Image: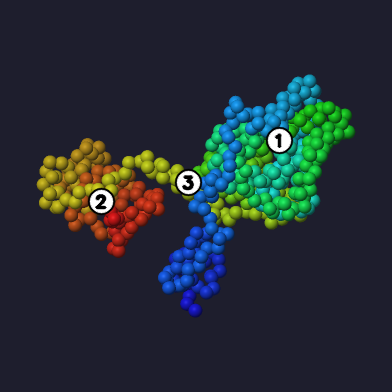
């Protein structure tokens, strides 16, 4: 049995996972997911991809092609295309709630209870519907599952099964026409517009795991009575029993609280795709912002969430506001939750670094840099001497610099420069006369106008590469374009 060459292990550090047995050899076919099989040897038999693994080139285009869309909303069809029950829930319930609130005194106990009940029912959505059922980011005991299923019903956002199907479609088709809350269709659409419309397409999202759950099936079956009890009866009865404010409880802890819970969840689809930073990835619209976290019970670190959806956390720093994470963690401490999923820190940091490098790259591109070596003319010593008679040309590290406009600005005085015009000032520049600063080296490089034939050192070293260019951010295509030659010099890639 051959072994993996040790130099590979030395270069790359210890392997992350056990070695394959038998070791990979050039004669083993290399499989590509789904589409085809490449073999290193043409004599080896080809293995056709099983039919059920054949995938289209683009799952979004494929889905759009194979699903029928309802027509765009217009004045002619709005009576049939709007979901009137949802229109009432979105528009009518807040109107009724705030109208009743104008005539209902708000008692302190009722206010505190309403806020408490907002968190109880809201967390049924965030910790239950979202992180437990939609993303399976932890395991919950049966007691916790029933608790979350019941309290979430008080948020009146459909059953677990319905909600999770939509949310999984949102993650699968983020920012596309198939995304139920597509942020590109505007803030209003992603906030509430999509709810008031009949779904424009029937989008595939797998919830088969949920249909196997007895709790999910039970909640789906009894959703309407659960909704009425948890959303309206309980918040009426508790204030009535304990501090004799049943009507106040109904208005504030029931209706008004429900409106706040609704818009809290809706903000995850709208505000979290609109406001804030993209510290982990900027491919799509999800963003991180404290304000969104504040109004969504901790779901505001949405950029992180879309990158690492199985992570039980939205906020990864201890000081960020994510009460849902704290709730799940607390449940684990008392044995109600287990197997909390956390994405590998190493991968999270890769995303962060990529975004930091992107920002640095933008800064890099806003800065003027010396002309690349391959753009400079190659000049003979004789020509350099001849041209130095008419311009102040100085040779340093094989590069010819025109310092005509810098003579008066030279901190050491013009005379130190003029005596090296038409001469090699390499030794003088790097310590012979003065050990110039990095800034001076950077500035000198900006004055490059040519390369002396045979005068450029064969290796990249600190005499030829200005300090500001020793670390640069390059696209991977740029790295290939200037692949090092066998002797270590950077050379332009051939046009072919
Ligand atoms: Zn989202
Ligand atoms: Zn999610």
Q: Secondary structure at mark 3?
A: helix
The residue tagged 2 is: 374
Q: Are marks 1 and 3 in contact (CB under 8 Å)?
A: no
Q: Is residue 375 left or right of residue 320?
A: left
Across and down, in percent, residue 244 comes to: 88, 29
* Label 3, residues with CA under 10 Å away: few <14, some 14-19, many ≥20: some
Residue 261 numbered tag: 1
Between the C-alphas of marks 3 and 2, the distance is: 30 Å
Front: mark 1 or 3: 1
Point out the tag, 3 or 2, that comes first from the N-terminus.
3
Considering the image in quadrants, where does the C terminus appear? Answer: bottom left
Residue depicted at x 56% and y 37%: 183
Between the C-alphas of marks 2 and 1, the distance is: 62 Å
- Does residue 268 lie above or below 90 as drawn? below
The residue tagged 3 is: 356
Q: How many marks?
A: 3
Point out the tag, 1 or 3, that comes first from the N-terminus.
1
Residue depicted at x 47% and y 66%: 30
Point out the tag, 2 or 1, that comes first from the N-terminus.
1
């Amino acid at each position: 049995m051959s072994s993996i060459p040790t130099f590979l292990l030395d270069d790359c550090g210890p392997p992350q996972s056990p070695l394959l047995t038998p070791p990979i050899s050039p004669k083993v076919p290399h499989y590509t997911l789904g589409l085809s099989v490449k073999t290193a040897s043409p004599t080896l038999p080809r293995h056709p991809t099983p039919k059920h693994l054949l995938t289209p080139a683009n799952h979004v285009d494929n889905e759009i092609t194979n699903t029928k869309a309802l027509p765009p909303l217009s004045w002619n069809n709005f009576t049939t295309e709007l979901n009137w029950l949802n229109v009432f829930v979105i528009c009518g319930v807040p109107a009724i709630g705030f109208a009743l609130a104008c005539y209902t005194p708000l008692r302190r106990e009722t206010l505190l209870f309403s806020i408490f009940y907002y968190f109880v029912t809201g967390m049924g959505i965030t910790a239950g519907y979202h992180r437990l059922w939609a993303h399976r980011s932890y395991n919950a005991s049966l007691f916790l599952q029933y608790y979350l299923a019941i309290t979430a019903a008080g948020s009146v956002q459909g059953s677990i099964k319905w909600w999770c199907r939509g949310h999984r479609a949102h993650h699968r088709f983020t920012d596309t026409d198939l995304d139920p809350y597509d942020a590109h269709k505007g803030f209003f659409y992603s906030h509430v517009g999509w709810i008031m419309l009949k779904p424009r397409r029937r989008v595939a999202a797998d919830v088969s795991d949920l249909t196997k759950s007895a709790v999910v099936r039970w909640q789906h079956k009894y959703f309407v009575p659960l909704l009425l009890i948890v959303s309206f009866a309980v918040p009426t009865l508790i204030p009535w029993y304990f501090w004799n404010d049943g009507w106040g409880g109904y208005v504030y802890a029931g209706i008004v609280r429900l409106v706040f819970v609704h818009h809290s969840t809706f903000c995850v689809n709208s505000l979290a795709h609109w406001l804030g930073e993209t510290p982990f990835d900027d491919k799509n619209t999800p963003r991180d912002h404290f304000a969104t976290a504040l109004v969504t019970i901790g779901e505001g670190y949405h950029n992180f969430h879309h990158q690492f959806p199985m992570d039980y956390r939205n906020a990864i720093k201890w000081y960020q506001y994510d009460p849902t994470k704290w709730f799940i963690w607390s449940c684990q401490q008392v044995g109600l939750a287990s197997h909390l999923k956390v994405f590998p820190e190493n991968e999270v940091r890769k995303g962060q670094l990529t975004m930091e490098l992107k920002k640095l790259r933008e800064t890099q591109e806003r800065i003027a840099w010396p002309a690349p070596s391959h753009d400079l003319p190659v000049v003979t010593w004789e020509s350099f001497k001849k041209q130095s008679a008419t311009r102040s040309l100085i040779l340093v590290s094989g590069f010819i610099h025109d310092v005509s406009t810098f003579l008066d600005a030279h901190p050491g005085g013009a005379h130190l420069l003029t005596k090296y015009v038409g001469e090699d000032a390499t030794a003088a520049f790097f310590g012979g006369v003065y050990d110039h600063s990095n800034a001076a080296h950077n500035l000198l490089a900006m004055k490059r106008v040519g390369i002396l034939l045979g005068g450029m050192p064969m290796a990249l070293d600190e005499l030829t590469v200005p300090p500001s260019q020793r670390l640069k951010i390059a696209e991977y295509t740029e790295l290939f374009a200037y692949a090092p030659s066998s002797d270590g010099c950077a050379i332009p890639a051939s046009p072919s």
